Amino acid sequence: MGVKKTLKKIWNKISSSDRILVTGGLGYIGSHTVVELMEAGYDVYIIDNLSNSNIDVLNGIEAITGKRPVFENIDCTDYVAMDKFFSKYEGFKAVIHFAAYKAVGESVSKPLRYYRNNILSLVNLLELMPIHKTHGFVFSSSCTVYGQPDTLPVDERSPIKPALSPYGSTKQMSEQIILDAVHASEDLHAVLLRYFNPIGAHPTSAIGELPNGVPNNLVPFVCQTAAGMHKKLKVFGDDYNTPDGTCIRDYISVVDLAKAHVKAIDRLLDEKVKKPEIYNIGTGKGQSVMEVIKTFEKVSGKRVPYEIVGRREGDIEQVWANPALANKKLKWVAEESFEDTLRSAWRWQEVVNKNSK
Ligand code: UFG
């Protein structure tokens, strides 16, 4: 642990710790972020409506940190309940807003559900924060806002492309809503983090990804296939313009991603964020679907049977990050190797399987 981090931890212990609200704090990225915030000495409060998460995640957080954060089951679209929550606890220095729907395919069939949930939650928070004197905001955005970028790696100045799904639209609209709200306010400060593809689990395997039903995302499906839960993985297309014909993504460890939030909060609380700041949070490297399968097989010692099928509608051919801005200004860098991250995903899958027996 660096000297600065240790000093911050000690300072937070002797002073009253800075209070941070995490919406969606029991979800996949949310729970890992809660752990990193608590380990950095922050006093974390969680709101989650459990629509895509599980109350048992609190036990995992407690097992890792030795402390159980305050949790309330509240839907962020419920303005009155949110207002009550802010009044009850008062004094949040910042909010990290994860609570949102995120299934791309489902958003195409249920667009209004996505707009209502993702947009209303955000607007409620941005309205309530100044009333309750909370000035820092960190938002979960996505590299989906770039669509298929014209140049790779993609940096933050790349143009926003038309969204390929209502989910993508909600992320683009949300970014704009935050920029407008900051512009109109004297004391709202925001950091927008554009995530690439988070994978893996906490090294303790006490928390990880818990997909609802059959996973849409590649790595959870690979893990479940290796565990014998599916006969075969479907590889969606091998005729893309990439070296092996399969799509390329920037897969980032969820723990590294979580740590980027701590850096963003540190920066907000140090009053370094004058204008809204937008950062790519990725590794800077791209891996193809076939590389994911082969590396997973190597690190897990398991076979992943697969078949090549047609392309999945709406898939981007290739995207990976230029994370230089986050490296420089947030002083954050993705540290875990691709192999270790896949290893952690597999270890977590083994724990989930053991617990379900
Ligand atoms: N894939 C398969 N088979 C599967 C699942 C996925 O071949 O069973 C392929 C996809 O076609 C894609 C790659 O694996 O080429 C990655 O797919 P994911 O579904 O894991 O991830 P996406 O990049 O499509 O989407 C994810 C998140 C979105 C986010 C986006 C940003 O799910 O919320 O990253 O790139 F917006």
Image (cartoon, rainbow, N blue to C red):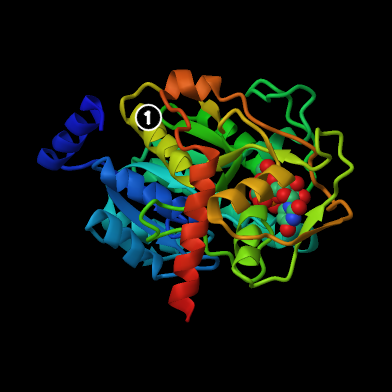
Q: Where is residue 278 drawn, in percent x and y?
A: 55, 28
Query: What amino acid type should be assigned to the residue bearing mark 1?
Result: Leu
The residue that appears at 32% across and 67% down in the rendered structure is: 59
Kindly identify which residue carries mark 1.
268
Is residue 169 visible to us here? no
User: Residue pushed farthest left?
Assistant: 14
Quadrant location, the N terminus: top left
The residue that appears at 51% across and 25% down in the rendered structure is: 277
Q: Where is residue 269 drawn, in percent x and y?
A: 32, 30
**Front residue of this view, candidates 313 and 52:** 313
Pointer 1 residue Cβ closer than 8 Å to ligand 1: no
Q: Where is residue 131 drawn, in percent x and y?
A: 38, 44
Rendered position, 14 above or below 207? above
**Front residue of this view, candidates 44 and 187:** 44
Q: Where is residue 107 drawn, in percent x and y?
A: 73, 58
Rendered position, 205 above or below 246? below
**Front residue of this view, candidates 34 and 191:** 34
Is residue 210 visible to us here? yes
The residue that appears at 63% across and 71% down in the rendered structure is: 228
Rendered position, 350 above or below 282? below
Rendered position, 88 above or below 13? below
Q: Is residue 289 left or right of residue 268?
A: right
Q: Is residue 132 left or right of residue 192?
A: left
